[in-house]
Amino acid sequence: MNTVEIKKIWDEIKEQLEKEIPSSTFGPWISTLEAVSFEDDTFTLISGVAMGVEYVKRTQYKTILECFKNYFGRDIVVNLEFNQEAAEAIKKERQKTEKKIQKEQEKEEEHKKAIENLSYVKSLNINLRYRFDNFVEDSNNKIAKAAAQAVAKNPTGKYNPLYIQGASGLGKTHLMQAIGHYVTMNSNLKVRCVKTDDFVTDYCNSTRFTPNQNTTVSMNKFRNKYRNVDILLIDDIQFIENKKKCIDELFHTFDALYNANKQIVLTSDKLPKDLPEIPERLRNRFEQGLIVEIYPPEYETRVKILENFAKEKGIENIPKEVFEYIAKYKTDNVRELEGGFTTLDGYSNFEETPITLEYAKKVLKYEENNKKPDIEKVIEEVAKFYDISVEDIKSSSRVQKISNARAIVSYIAREKLGKTYKNIALSLNKRHQTITYSAENIKKSIKNDNNLKNETDKILKALNL
Ligand code: ADP
Ligand code: MG
């Protein structure tokens, strides 16, 4: 009889025995017996526990013999033996089970901790999407990523502050939040992540005198919030410019943290030296650590970022040529790159049309839009029309003719090229608000001022717009 058949018989007899023998004995001593042979009406069961064999023989042997007799309809000799190999196997099995239980407990603990961490991370303003593992690296952002990782692994180390500079949409916030995410998940250090605008608002609210607010108390609260941390992450520090009182507070916050050996991370679209409105003493603080710059990603990186982006959103089976098409046109801003794909995905859902290259071209129309002149061309054309130089337009001159030309550039770039005021402001070296105001002004004036309308039309014609 082969072992499978023997085991089957034993299983059936065991079922019977379970009904006859108290479970306190059956569980540890009978259910663990193994059937190994059945020859010449002799059935052999082995156990890995010597004491168990003795105990079963003493207390249950009769019942066992009866069950075997009932099963076979004749007397069977039942051999109960202790077996060293079985003992080893049992020992191993027990260790395995114990390890398994321990691992499961550890897993459960980890899971619990991860959930606690997750809600904690969320409460710290940290976007869980921004991690190091999904930040696609290339030679244009490699140093910034390496520095961010070094700071995350060893905050309060040698790179303090870490200042991440790059144009809009290149991953500064992503890297900064990845630091916060990593530190929170891997240590007990206290992290605070704040946008400069929120820091400013928070400060203003804390200093505002109202009948219900004791400003000493609210300022203490404010200071405790930003100084009683191990890492302070401040996003878009350029927005602190012109906020004089807040600059003072930031300066003291900075010093308090720095002197206590706490890590500070700052991001900005400008280098400290290009923030003239920020007092030198604070700019010097920004410069005393490590400054890293991020440049627009290469073509292959852009394609990969899009592939990852789609995957993270659970969108599959998109032809690679679609990603390549978007990456070809959206070259200098990852946010716009991702925005291109999001638009396409939205249209595809609403129109219930699968995403193909043809469909992408139809929806995004990058070829057509790309034929439009860029802002530099507009500046050139406007300068030519008013007989001034490109440098004049980009200068800080307030001569009427020049500021008028500048306003027309802003208007055309906004209305005809669809540029953001922020981008226009960057190209013209002006403040965002100034550009917004002058472009809106032209837009209004053009309705009543025929001269202005004629001039603008001529410029637009020259630009093929
Ligand atoms: P910034 O703060 O510099 O304006 P963000 O960090 O907000 O830019 O990045 C804009 C978007 O682009 C985010 O969705 C971010 O995840 C993504 N992004 C930027 N660079 C990369 C990169 N190298 N790999 C993956 N995603 C990136
Ligand atoms: Mg940002």
Image (cartoon, rainbow, N blue to C red):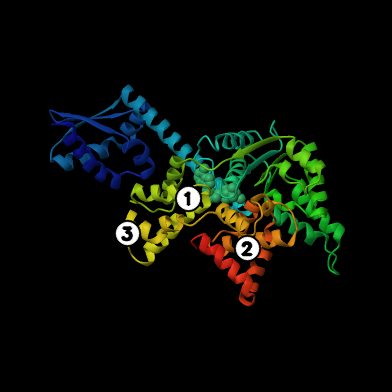
Q: Nearer the viewer, residue 233 or 355?
A: 355
Q: Residue shown at 71%/53% (left/top)?
A: 239
Q: Looking at the picture, how far across and down is residue 28, in whole percent?
A: 37, 37
Q: Which sits earlier in the primary sequence, circle 2 or circle 1? A: 1
The amino acid marked with disc number 3 is: Pro
The answer as to whether callout 3 falls within 8 Å of ligand 1 is no
Q: Which residue corresponds to mark 1?
A: 330
| Figure quadrant of residue 359 | bottom left
Q: Is residue 115 visible?
A: no
| Figure quadrant of residue 153 | top right
Decide: is 54 above or below 446: above
* Residue at mark 2 to residue at mark 1: CA–CA distance: 26 Å
The amino acid marked with disc number 1 is: Lys
Decide: is 384 above or below 131: below
Viewer-nearest of labels 1 and 3?
Answer: 1
Labels 1 & 3 near each other (Cβ < 8 A): no
Q: Which residue corresponds to mark 2?
A: 408
Q: Quadrant of the N terminus?
A: top left
Q: Which mark is residue 354?
A: 3
Viewer-nearest of labels 2 and 1?
Answer: 2
* Residue at mark 2 to residue at mark 3: CA–CA distance: 42 Å
